Image (cartoon, grey):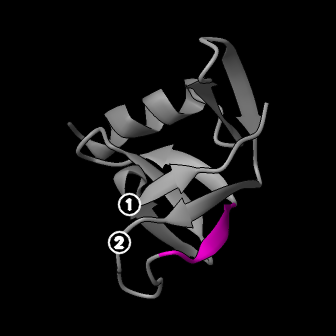
Amino acid sequence: MSIIEISEINKYCDPHSVLIVTNRNKLVRLKCPFKVQVICNIVGLQEGEIVFVESVKINLNLNLVYLIKDKYYHYRNFMILFKE
């Protein structure tokens, strides 16, 4: 997928929120910044650390990435902290 195609996708996606399904099967939109916990050590972040997602994007591989502390990280490295 080209950068132009990714740019088109990002135009229609909201970079300031994500949709999640809660434990009670409710669809909820979380607006940035939202809290996540690091679930494995990655460059610049340690397992167990709690950080805030500043924005969300889709990368060139069509993966969701979070902007945290001015760096992009794959969403799989985090657990969203949300209380109903």
Element under label 1?
helix
* Marked residue nearer the N-terminal end (1 or 2): 2
Q: Nearer the viewer, residue 61 or 6?
A: 61
Residue designated by label 2 = 40
Taking 81 as reference, is 37 above or below it? below
Identify which amino acid the numbered label 2 is placed on: Cys
Quarter of the image for the N terminus: give it: top left
- Residue at 50% from the left image edge and 46% from the top image edge: 57
- Residue at 62% from the left image edge and 23% from the top image edge: 22
- Residue at 45% from the left image edge and 39% from the top image edge: 7
Q: Quadrant of residue 14?
A: top right
Tag 1 near tag 2, CB within 8 Å = yes
* Left or right: 30 as drawn, with respect to 78: right
List x then y, in percent, for residue 55.
Answer: 65, 53
List x then y, in percent, for residue 24.
Answer: 64, 15
Element under label 2?
loop
Identify which amino acid the numbered label 1 is placed on: Asn
List x then y, in percent, for residue 51.
Answer: 65, 70
Q: Residues within 10 Å of mark 2 (few under 14, many from 20)?
A: some
The residue most toward the front is 24
- Residue at 44% from the left image edge and 52% from the top image edge: 65
Residue designated by label 1 = 77
What segment is highlighted magenta in the picture? 48-53
